Amino acid sequence: MRRVLDSRQLLAFVTLARRGSFTLTAKEIFLTQSAVSHAIKALERELGARLFDRLGRRVQLTQAGEQLLRHAERILREMDGARTGLEQLQNWRHSRLRVGASPTACQYLLPTVLREFKQSFPRCVIRIEPGDGPRMVELLRENQVDLALMLEPAVGEDIAFRRLFEDELRMLVSPLHPWARAGRVRREDIATETIIIYNKASYTFRMVEEYFRRDDLMLQNPIELGSMEAIKELVKIGVGAGIVAPWIAQKEIAEGSLVSLPLGPRKLRRVWGVAHLRGRRLALAEETFSGLCESVATTFHLREQAA
């Protein structure tokens, strides 16, 4: 009878495959480098195959290693799910929730969701990992977060996405800006205008760039920022024009300190939702959190329609 693979060896293997370094792997799983090396050698002996090629201080998966990685990641996820399920079976109110969220979601959506969530799960340990869309997908695949509140990812058959609401990206300008007085964005001015936009690593930046590329327009003077509040403040003082969804600037638009204009004849819409690994059964806390996101998002969707 074949021996069952050691889960500790599989953990060391998966971590080393992701990190590519014995030093970083040892730090992450709280072992010595010698212990990690021993675990990998023991696993290779057990399987009768070399799993890594050593390239100086770095390692790279062999073909056998790549094949094992797909199975090992699934095994570890299922083991983690089994442990979480048993913990919640013992006491469903004592659980953990690891949420990834874009900075925009962290600032505008999460506070209301978390306030409601804590009423039902007062003892749930919550950890929030901020980051943009590509980083959220990475964290989900590495099992570093359970759920991600984010824009719909462009690719990824392994990611399940629960749609919450759509918004539209529009141009925000100061009331004194020439576009505000004209009541429209003048296409001939876009190339020379200072455009203030969310950072380059985000899905939003890619969408805006593609939107203007289709019209053979290039943003010559963009300012990239990681904060919607900072974008709004720069627009208010006339530094340039910002590209923001109106629900994020609802107060400023209502009071007249900012003016919202369409980007052009075509609308640029985004889809927000809650993502998780496909095939992963959500725990009660995760299902509740997703449902609360949907309820809160309904409010923002109605605001977006009104704007």
Image: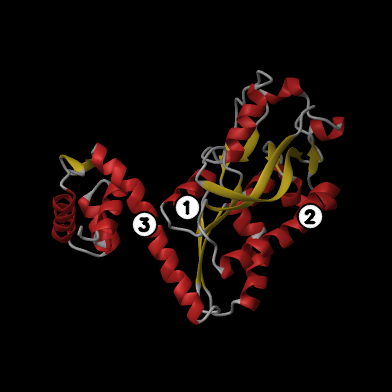
Give the mark nearer the N terminus: 2 vs 3.
Answer: 3
Against 154, residue 135 (above or below) is below
**What is the quadrant of residue 56 in the picture?**
top left
Amino acid marked by disc 1: Leu
Residue count near mark 2 (Cα–Cα under 10 Å), binned few <14, some 14–19, many ≥20: few
- Mark closer to the observer (1, 3): 3
Quarter the N terminus occupies:
bottom left
Disc 1/disc 3 C-alpha distance (Å): 16 Å
Q: What residue is drawn where x is 57% and y is 42%?
A: 153
- Residue 297 seen from this side: yes
Q: Is residue 234 left or right of residue 276?
A: right
Instruction: Give the residue at x 13% y 51%.
Output: 45
Could you tell which of marks 2 and 1 lies nearer the N-terminus?
A: 1
The answer to the question of whether label 2 and label 3 lie on touching residues, with beta carbons closer than 8 A, is no
Say few, some or many: other residues with alpha carbon within 10 Å of mark 1 (under 14 / 14 to 19 / 20 or more): many
Position of residue 162 in the picture relative to residue 132 (left or right): right
Instruction: Using the image as rendered, state which of residue 143 and residue 150 is in the foreground.
Output: 143
Which residue type carries mark 2?
Lys
User: Could you classify mark 3 by the number of other residues whose Cα lies within 10 Å: few (under 14), some (14-19), or many (20 or more)?
Assistant: some
Q: Secondary structure at mark 1?
A: helix
- Labels 1 and 3: the sequence-earlier one: 3
For label 2, the residue is 251
- Figure check: 122 above or below 302: below
Check disc 3 and give the amino acid type.
Ile
**Residue 17: image location, x then y, percent:** 29, 47
Q: Which residue is mark 1?
A: 140
